[in-house]
Image: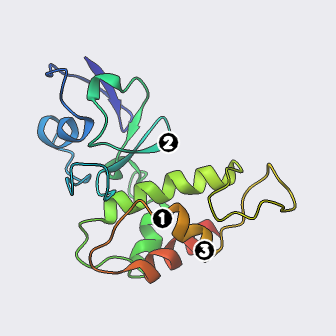
Amino acid sequence: MSLRINGNVHELRLDNRTTLLDTLREHLDLTGAKKGCDHGQCGACTVLVGGRRINSCLVLAVACDEPVTTIEGLASHDRLHPLQEAFVSRDALQCGYCTPGQICSAVGMLDEAAAGHPSHVTPPYRPGVGGPELLTPEEIRERMSGNICRCGAYANIVDAIEEAAS
């Protein structure tokens, strides 16, 4: 099978039951996405597929017909992605285990908000419906709720996302 990951095409021979997470980690040595719960509940394995955030532990590699972007593919040459820079400057990490998934999720979340996708806490009657959503701390917390940080760096994670969004 063929997968486009971080701009590169990889030809692989895999068991058709291999998850995208196991493909990344075990077959391509892309270890940024972490195996946290292996049930899609913690978000440590979040990557972008076709620009949308997904839990890679729940998706079979053979089902990925769109480009995959991992934490390793976010930086551009020698420059970190703005969210990576914000996480560093805001000290939005402690042990770092969840950080790749948090950052990939935040990239997808910012794209969703820019496209005008509402969240559960978005007010139903708001000006400019269909335009970019205003990312309040409450919006960010709701939109990032699928990513767990066991160290409790949530306040700094919200600050980092706010910084990158501005």
Task: Give the mark nearer the N terminus: 1 vs 3.
Answer: 1
Task: Give the mark nearer the N terminus: 3 vs 2.
Answer: 2
Q: Is residue 99 visible?
A: yes
Label 3 sits on a secondary structure element that is helix
Task: Give the mark nearer the N terminus: 2 vs 1.
Answer: 2
| Residue located at (21% from left, 49% from top) | 38
| Residue located at (31% from left, 25% from top) | 3
Q: According to the image, label 2 marks what residue?
A: 52
Looking at this view, is 105 or 138 the one in front?
138
Q: What residue type is labelled 2?
A: Arg
Residue 82 coordinates in the image, percent (x, y): 50, 64
Looking at this view, is 143 or 112 the one in front?
143
Please report contact status of discs 1 and 3: CB closer than 8 Å, yes or no: no
Q: According to the image, label 1 marks what residue?
A: 83
Q: According to the image, label 3 marks what residue?
A: 138
Task: State how many labels appear.
Answer: 3
For discs 2 and 1, the disc positioned in front in the rendered view: 2
Q: Is residue 79 visible?
A: no
128 left or right, relative to 20: right
Label 1 sits on a secondary structure element that is helix
Looking at this view, is 12 or 142 the one in front?
142
Quadrant in which the N terminus is drawn: top left
Residue 92 coordinates in the image, percent (x, y): 39, 77
User: Is residue 86 placed above or below 43 in the rendered structure?
Assistant: below
